[in-house]
Amino acid sequence: MSPSPKPDLTSLGGILEKTLKSCRPKHDMEMLKIFDLWVDAVGENISMNAKPAAFKGDLLLVHVSSSAWMHHLYFQKQELIEKINATLGHDRVRELKFKIGPF
C-alpha cells in the first residue's frame, strides 16, 4: 500500500489575503499597507502615540494616545498625509481623522 499524497498546505495569512481581495476593491488593499509601513511613514516618536485604526475610501482614522497628541498632530495633518502617501508610493490618503483610542 503506497502512502497517500499530502495535501498542499496554505497559510492562514494567504487565505485571509485572498478573502480580503475578493471583498475589498484594489484601492483598499493598497491602503492596508499603511499598517505595516506606519513607523516608516510618520517616524518612531509619532508612532508611539498614534496608530492607524481604520480607513474608508481615502480617509484614514488614526487613534492617538491623548488629546494633546490629537491637537499636535492636527497641525501636522498635511505634512503627515504627504509622508504617508510618499511611503505608500501613491496618493491614497487625502484626509486624516484623529480620535483618542486604544493602541
Image: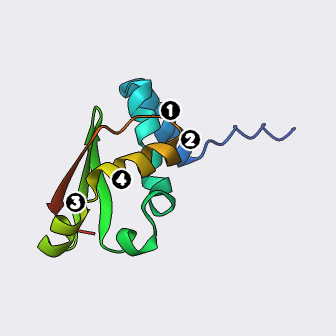
Q: Could you give the CA–CA distance between mark 3 and mark 2, rounded to whole angstroms?
A: 39 Å
Q: Is residue 75 left or right of residue 49?
A: left
The local crowd at label 1, few if under 14, some if 14 to 19, many if 20 or more residues have their Cα within 10 Å, is few
Distance of label 3 from label 1 (alpha carbons): 38 Å
User: Given the image, on which type of amino acid does mark 1 rest?
Assistant: Lys
| Pointer 2 residue | 14
Q: Which residue is mark 4?
A: 79
Horizontal relation, residue 74 to residue 16: left or right: left
Badge 2 marks a residue whose secondary structure is helix
- Pointers 3 and 4 in contact (C-beta within 8 Å): no
**Residue 44 has which mark?**
none
Distance Cα–Cα, label 3 vs label 4: 9 Å
Q: Which residue is mark 1?
A: 18
Can you see residue 101? no
* Residue 63 position within the rendered picture, expressed as x and y whole percent measured from the top left: 23, 61
Q: Is residue 22 above or below residue 103?
A: above
Residue type at numbered disc 2:
Gly
State if disc 1 and disc 4 touch (CB < 8 Å): no
Label 4 vs label 1: CA separation? 33 Å
Asked whether the residues under the numbered discs 4 and 2 touch, taking CB atoms below 8 Å apart as contact, a structural biologist would say no
The residue sitting at 30% across, 49% down in the picture is 78
The reply to whether dot 3 and dot 2 touch (C-beta < 8 Å) is no
Specify the quadrant that holds the C terminus: bottom left
Circle 3 packing at 10 Å, graded few (<14), some (14-19), many (20+), is: few
Q: Quadrant of residue 57?
A: top left
The amino acid pointed to by label 3 is Phe
- Mark 3 vs mark 1, foreground winner is 3
